[in-house]
Structures are given as C-alpha cells and as structure tokens.
Amino acid sequence: MTNPMLTNLGRKWWFVGGLSAASGSVTLPLLHAAGLGSPETWPQWLVCFLCFSGVWKCLSFIAWFAVLLLAPSSTLLDPVKR
C-alpha cells in the first residue's frame, strides 16, 4: 500500500486542509458517541489524538484510492521528487 503523504497528492494544501477538516468532523462525533466529551486529562487527549490519527489515515487512503480509480495516470499519484 502506498502512503498518500509520499505522493504529490499529500503535498497539496487543499488536500491536507480538506483532510484535516474531514478528520475533525468525523473524530468529534465519534468521541462523543464513545462517551468521551471534551478531553480533560492527558489520557483522554491521547485517545483523542489517536482517534484523529486513525481517521486521518483512513480518509487519506480512501482519497488516494479514489484518485487512483478515477484518474490512474494522474500526476498526483507520482512519488514526491527529492
């Protein structure tokens, strides 16, 4: 599996901004549904961060896969030049 952040797609500001907004929009209701309101202690903040990270990874893979299916020859899927 290719890491979307190592492609040109992960370097685009609109992708990272949209991904951040979507991850936050999914994470907050997920934490409230789990019974964790607003985090107060460091273990709650850790759970919040891990949830956000997991949602971020899932959504970034879904977006990368969507680009792969819709435009397989897109330059967004090329590796980042170093």
Image (cartoon, grey):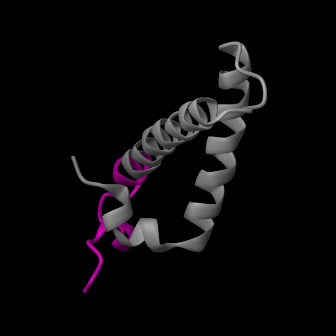
Q: Please provide percent x and percent y for residue 14.
A: 62, 67
> Is residue 49 in the magenta section?
no
Q: How many marks?
A: 0
Q: Quadrant of residue 13?
A: bottom right
Vertical order, 1 against 78 (above or below) = above
Q: Nearer the viewer, residue 57 or 46?
A: 46
Identify the residue at horizontal 57%, vertical 31% (top origin).
43
Image side of residue 1 versus residue 50, left or right: left
Q: Nearer the viewer, residue 78 or 38?
A: 38
Identify the residue at horizontal 39%, vertical 69% (top origin).
76
Identify the residue at horizontal 40%, vertical 51% (top origin).
64
Q: Give the quadrant of the C terminus.
A: bottom left
Identify the residue at horizontal 46%, vertical 37% (top origin).
54
Q: Please provide percent x and percent y for residue 2.
A: 24, 53
Q: Nearer the viewer, residue 71 or 48?
A: 48
Vertical order, 78 against 50 (above or below) = below
Image side of residue 14 versus residue 66, left or right: right
The residue lying furthest to the front in this view is: 41
Q: Which residues are magenta?
A: 66-82
The residue lying furthest to the right in this view is: 38
Q: Quadrant of residue 5?
A: bottom left
Q: Nearer the viewer, residue 11 or 53?
A: 53
Vertical order, 71 against 44 (above or below) = below
> Is residue 70 in the magenta section?
yes
The residue lying furthest to the bottom in this view is: 82
Q: Please provide percent x and percent y for residue 21.
A: 69, 50
Vertical order, 47 against 75 (above or below) = above
